[in-house]
Image (cartoon, rainbow, N blue to C red):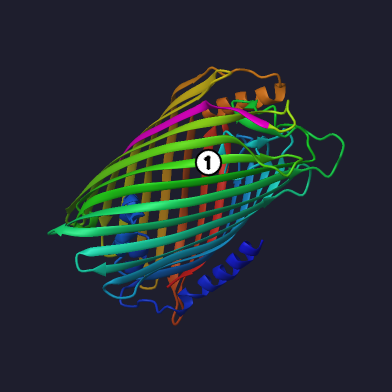
């Protein structure tokens, strides 16, 4: 809690920083808006993973402060993720070019949300710690607070650019009814990069990222009667019998160390073309404490990742064209630990590889933008092929999915007056299941079998999503620019509709 209170103070201070920064008035509202919410920058965001490239993020400074209210309602859902999410948040971000050689940037946010009807998952960050989650059949609503902070600095030295960025994220989740959950996470990342301009308008860069993640979760019961079992899951409904049960208190710790190393080659700061690649590795260790005070390592999840991307752009008068290809591969291996208590001291018997997950994504994206004095239109169609294989050994169980994903995004910005801008965004996405196979081994628990079967059926379903947003900005005399934005999307899955709505109010300067 001390860390969270400190973070609150840092967050409040950071929110006040942009107010003390003088906004740029040399550009019109519409020019500033197009620069701050640049469609092409979003299309090629991977090259900004290197903090040494961040001075090229924008030609001018900008800041934003906003509050938002989001809500999702899912009629078809995975129990581990919940059926409904209500979210209130406040956030601020700023990008400031101090002079020709120095740039700073940062972001801070606070969110308060409630996740409804979450079952078979007593942890935060499910996609990070799965399949080694704590789970029970009861679950319930979770109240969650989330704090984030990020800041970076860039310095230019003749032909060399240096950049560093530090980010921190903290979460506090709890449930006030049995099973009573308390979970905290902390996630610290540090990025550093260098860029060298080696020939005419060509440059090459290298960057490295280190990350330290920790999650502490405890599940306890106020009632001494009718306690459900708390399972220490190993995947596909299998669980660690030795550490599962209805103990009065269950405590889990996840600790992860990870790194990424990458680089890029660009021409004209990525305006003409770029090549980007990165590799990384993470090691997540799960430890358990039952009724004793000793922690036992019970599972280890190791992931090796690789990503490569290339993009080429063309300019024809007012028309901007681009094409991008991307490939991502992640291979995860799970190691489980076995113990015995036949002696006076609990003894480690074995470590064995028991879980494997491979995920591969190949994508092709296209970019088109038409820019005029009073409007701009950007269209980004894309195609992705995704393959996911999961396998468990002893007992053998697994599933495989292949997806074809088609979609398009549209971003239209219009200058309706000297002091007013309206923007419309829309998207359509269709996920078609090409292959869905399973060799799931049923367990002795009917409720667990229902869960893993329903989870497979969800992942094996086609999903069609359509959505859009409208935003209005107005600049009043002697005041920063005010804006309001409303968003709505609907996803159809298994002939039912899942909806998402959002409303945001804020200022930019």
Q: Is residue 158 left or right of residue 250?
A: left
Task: Give the prevailing secondary structure in the magenta stretch.
Answer: strand
Q: Residue at the spot x=77%, y=40% of the render?
A: 291
- The residue range painted magenta reads 347-364
Q: The N terminus lies in which quarter of the figure?
A: bottom right
Hey, which residue is sitting farthest front in the picture? 344
Asked if one can make out residue 375 in the rendered structure from this viewpoint, the answer is: no
Label 1: how many residues lie within 10 Å, few (<14), some (14-19) or many (20+)?
Answer: many
Q: Is residue 247 above or below residue 218?
A: above
Q: Is residue 94 above or below residue 437?
A: below
Quarter of the figure with residue 3: bottom right
Q: Residue at the spot x=48%, y=75% of the render?
A: 17
Query: Does the magenta-highlighted stretch encompass residue 355?
Result: yes
Q: Residue at the spot x=57%, y=19% of the render?
A: 394
Q: Is residue 121 left or right of residue 245?
A: left
Residue named by callout 1: 284
Instruction: Point out residue 506 in the picture as x, y percentages from the top left corner.
Output: 51, 67
Pick the front one: 474 or 224: 224
Quarter of the figure with residue 289: top right
Q: Is residue 495 left or right of residue 61?
A: right
Q: Is residue 377 above or below residue 439?
A: below
Pick the front one: 304 or 381: 304
Q: The C terminus lies in which quarter of the figure?
A: bottom left
Pick the front one: 38 or 451: 451
């Amino acid at each position: 809690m001390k860390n969270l209170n400190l973070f609150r103070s840092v967050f409040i201070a950071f929110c006040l920083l942009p107010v003390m920064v003088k906004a740029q008035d040399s550009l019109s509202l519409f020019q500033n808006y197009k620069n701050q919410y640049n469609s092409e920058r979003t299309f090629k965001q991977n090259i900004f993973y290197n903090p040494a490239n961040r001075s090229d993020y924008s030609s001018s400074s900008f800041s934003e402060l906003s509050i938002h209210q989001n809500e999702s309602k899912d009629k078809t859902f995975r129990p581990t993720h919940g059926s409904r999410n209500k979210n209130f948040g406040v956030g601020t971000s700023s990008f400031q070019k101090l002079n020709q050689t120095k740039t700073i940037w940062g972001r801070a946010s606070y969110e308060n949300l409630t996740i409804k009807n979450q079952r078979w998952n007593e942890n935060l960050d499910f996609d990070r710690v799965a399949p080694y989650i704590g789970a029970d059949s009861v679950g319930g609503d979770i109240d969650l607070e989330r704090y984030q902070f990020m800041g970076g600095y860039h310095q230019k030295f003749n032909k060399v650019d240096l950049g560093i960025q530090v980010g921190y994220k903290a979460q506090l989740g709890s449930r006030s009814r049995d099973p009573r959950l308390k979970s905290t996470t902390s996630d610290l990342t540090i990025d550093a990069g260098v860029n060298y301009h080696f020939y005419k308008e060509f440059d090459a860069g290298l960057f490295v990222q280190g990350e330290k993640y920790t999650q502490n979760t405890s599940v306890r019961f106020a009632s001494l009667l009718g306690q459900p079992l708390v399972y220490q899951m190993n995947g596909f409904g299998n669980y660690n019998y030795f550490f599962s049960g209805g103990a009065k208190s269950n405590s889990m710790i996840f600790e992860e160390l990870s790194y990424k190393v990458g680089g890029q080659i660009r021409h004209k700061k990525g305006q003409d073309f770029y090549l980007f690649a990165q590799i990384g590795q993470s090691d997540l260790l799960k430890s358990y404490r039952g009724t004793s005070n000793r922690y036992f390592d019970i599972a280890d999840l190791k992931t090796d990742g690789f990503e490569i991307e290339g993009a080429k752009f063309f300019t024809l008068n007012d028309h901007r064209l681009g094409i991008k290809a991307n490939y991502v591969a992640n291979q995860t291996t799970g190691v489980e630990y076995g113990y015995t208590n036949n002696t006076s001291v609990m003894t480690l018997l074995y470590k064995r590889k028991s879980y494997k997950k491979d995920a591969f994504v190949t994508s092709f994206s296209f970019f088109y933008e038409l820019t005029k004095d009073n409007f701009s239109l950007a269209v980004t169609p894309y195609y992705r092929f995704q393959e996911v294989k999961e396998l468990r050994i002893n007992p053998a169980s697994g599933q495989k999915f292949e997806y074809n994903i088609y979609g398009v995004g549209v971003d239209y910005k219009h200058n309706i007056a000297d002091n007013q801008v309206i923007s419309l965004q829309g998207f359509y996405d269709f996920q078609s299941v090409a292959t869905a196979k399973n060799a799931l081994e049923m367990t002795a628990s009917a409720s667990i079998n229902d869960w893993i079967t329903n989870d497979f059926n969800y992942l094996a379903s086609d999903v069609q999503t359509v959505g859009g947003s409208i935003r209005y900005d107005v600049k009043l005399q002697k005041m920063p620019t005010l804006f309001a934005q409303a968003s709505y999307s609907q996803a159809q899955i298994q002939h039912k509709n899942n909806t998402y709505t959002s409303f945001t109010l804020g200022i930019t300067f």
